[in-house]
Amino acid sequence: MTRGGHDALDGERPGVLAAEAEGYLLAHAHHEQIRREAEELCGRLPWLTGAQAEELTGHYVRLRLDVSRQLLLGTVRRAEELRTEHEDRYAALRRVLLRRHAAAACAVLACGAWVSSLAGVLAR
């Protein structure tokens, strides 16, 4: 089992391992970008001691990662809401379409039965 709860070696989902590796690399790149921003911020504050700069860098990185995490969780939550709304609407449209096709098929069968009975009456 991988960290995300998927078994990438079972062959059921061939892209899971690649997707997890890509996610890891993106997260690592994001973390490095945040660290560079923090170091750049500390570079603009020349009066900080080395320990203070490290503490500020760590604090900045934690805050930015928390903000990024919250934004991603919000995006995931909204995507799930939209998927649910879309699936519900799609199911409703399928039901309407099925009813219309059933009604049309019944009308065609009724017309066919009427024509058949009319032909039987006229043939006598």
Image (cartoon, helix red, strand yellow):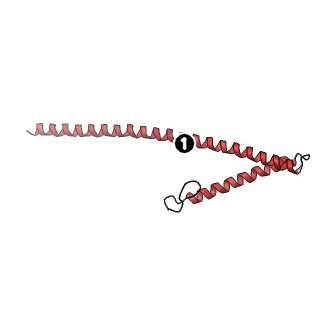
Q: Is residue 38 left or right of residue 82?
A: right
Q: Quadrant of residue 59?
A: top right
Q: Residue at x 27, y 38 (%)?
A: 106
Residue count near mark 1 (Cα–Cα under 10 Å), binned few <14, some 14–19, many ≥20:
few
Q: Main secondary structure of the magenta part?
A: loop
Question: Residue at the right extreme?
Answer: 47
Q: Residue at x 62, y 58 (%)?
A: 21
Along the line of sight, the residue nearer the viewer: 65 or 87: 65
Q: Is residue 81 left or right of residue 105?
A: right
Q: Is residue 80 above or below residue 13?
A: above
Along the line of sight, the residue nearer the viewer: 109 or 93: 93
Q: Quadrant of residue 3?
A: bottom right
Residue 103 position in % (x across, y down): 30, 37
Which residue is identified by label 1?
80
Q: Is residue 7 above or below residue 116?
A: below
Q: Is residue 19 left or right of residue 35?
A: left
Question: Residue at the left extreme?
Answer: 124
Q: Which residues are magenta?
A: 1-7
Q: Is residue 111 left or right of residue 40?
A: left
Query: What is the secondary structure assignment of the residue under circle 1?
Result: helix
- Locate the C terminus by quadrant: top left
Instruction: Identify which amino acid the numbered label 1 is placed on.
Output: Glu
Q: Is residue 58 magenta?
A: no
